[in-house]
Image (cartoon, grey):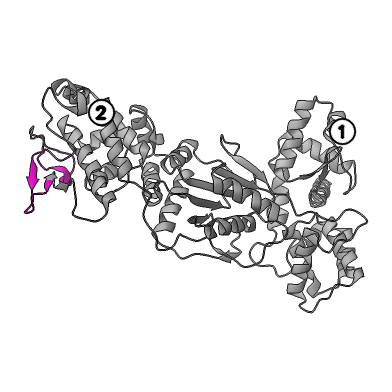
Amino acid sequence: MTAHTTARSAAHPNPHDAPYGTHGAREPFSPLGTHETHGTHETDTTRDTHSAHGTHNAHGTHHIGGTPDTRETEDGAVREASRVGALIRGHRLRIGMTQRELADLSTISVRAIRDLEQGKARRPRPDTVRLMADALRLGPRARAALEAAAQRGRPGGQGWAEPPAPPTALHAILGRDDEAGVLERELGSGAERLAHVVGLAGVGKTRLALEVADRLHRAGTPVLWHAFPGATADYLTCGEGTVAARVAATAARLWAAPDPASAVRAAHGPGGGGGDPEGAEAVSALAELLGDRAALLVLDGAPADPPRFGLLTALLRACPGLRLLVTSDRPWEMPGERIFLLSPPAVPAEGTVDRAAPAVRVFLDHVRRVRPGFGATSADLERATWICRRLDGHPGALAAAASWLVLCDLDALCRSLDADPAALLDHLGGGEGTGRLRRALHALTDRLTPGARGLLEELCAGGGPDDEFTLTGITALTGRDLPGSGRLLRELLISGAVRVAHEGDGSHFRVLGLVRAACGARAVASVSATS
């Protein structure tokens, strides 16, 4: 606390230690609008130079500092929100505190305080109320009155004629019923509030998020969607507006560094806010929009670096009904994060042909887009199944492979993939996104820890594309103990380099053929560069 504030506190004893925040036996300010009589003036803003004396309009409605504590309206939430602003202003003026000083002590921005006192912000979030009460040094009963008014002022967020909807998918989803059902139940029930779908680029994370969001929206849940730069937008976007702007502002602040000066002020304040008034404002604006209602926020293609945990936590506390569905290439490893590893769709077992297998259905769907009159014979199904196994059922790789059928038939495509699957990972049509899967495969190995990278190189060098291994086999290969081997294997699994099959006799793992091909191509390139 500053020296000025300390001196002022000595001159004006804290009135909030008495019941309802009264000074002695007198209650100069009540929730009903009884006016302050000290006549304290503000000096920090032009808008806040009113005397603390109350005024009355022609209808006898009481005002404090020009802000009505009630409004003639049918919206009870607006009346209570104005009461919250009047309470904050009255408590602040009684102890001679300016808006700037309150902002410094509470870590709430001056703008947010001004909006509350003027009734522009109608639903302060619980954290804002708590920080205000701490900075104003309210007694238990005055704090309870402020919290009660704030709670009545935010019954459920702003109303919408129709709940905001997710973007419209351009293609049907195939083979993801189990995954979509699990996420729908977890997020719809609130069992999970932060579900993070991770996996290789092109594996279908965005399409799964679209499906889950659509199911929840059809059940009545508002869906807020934000795509980060670089995300693959294979859908029809929703219209822009206030909702999208507030979501974008909040998403931007989650990864923005706070202002250093604000962080210093926060260190001397009552805590919370993360030292970022802009972030607190963005969270407050979104919380005002949502209130306590259930809603889904999708962050598609989120940055690999984790967001600021304090601000993310503040958002979840401010919006108790909010659930987050995030898609990115790797997890954040944060408390409360539900990591949902999305592997490629299942492929038929070696020596079998299954037209209904998810990966085969995905591939044939792409083939029909390229060759509308395609009718799969038994030989075609055998080749399609082989292609799916060779490309691990990866949807992005299957789409790129199918695009080459404009120039060749399935038999020629199989021969090309057998020689070098990495050569056909880029879509024939080129354009934006070409080479994305290849770059993702290279980035996968680059971001592995040295131990995990060494293990992956050993696995790729020591077996074929269909070779499987177990955790026990990894301990024998590396010479590490079970916990150490397990951590390395988990890293490979979470990165998307390895897929797992849980069978009756235990869990079996296999390095993706695409990863083997990418590692082999990089090894050849490295040898060529040094020779």
Q: Which residue does the image show at 90% across and 64% down from the upper left?
A: 382
Which amino acid type corresponds to the residue marked 1 in the rendered image?
Answer: Gly
Label 2: few (<14), some (14–19) or many (≥20) C-alpha neighbours in 10 Å:
some
> Which residue sits at x=29%, y=32%?
144
Mark 1 nearby-residue class (10 Å; few <14, some 14–19, many ≥20):
few
- Label 2–label 1 contact, CB within 8 A: no
Residue 303 in view (yes/no): no
**Which residue is nearer to you in this view: 153 or 91?**
153
Residue 401: percent from the left, percent from the top? 78, 65
SS under mark 1:
helix
Q: Quick check: can you spot residue 71?
A: yes
How far across and down, in percent of the image, does residue 428 sit? Answer: 74, 68
- The disc at residue 48 is none
Instruction: Residue at 45%, 59% (x, y): give it.
Output: 163
Q: Is residue 488 magenta?
A: no
- Left or right relative to 409: residue 312: left
> Who comes first in sequence, dot 2 or dot 1?
2
Residue indicated by mark 1: 473
Residue depicted at x 65% and y 54%: 205
Tag 2 residue: 141
Query: Would you say the magenta stretch is mainly helix, strand or loop?
Result: loop
Indicate the amino acid at tag 2. Arg
Mark 2 lies on a secondary structure that is: helix
**Mark 2 to mark 1 CA distance (whole Å):** 65 Å
Q: Which residues are magenta?
A: 40-62
Image-based side of 394 in relation to 2, left or right: right
- Find residue 191 and report its horizontal and vertical position in percent: 57, 41
Image quarter in which the N terminus is found: top left
Considering only vertical position in the picture, is 261 above or below 384? above
How many numbered markers are drawn? 2
Horizontal side of residue 119 vs 403, given as left or right: left
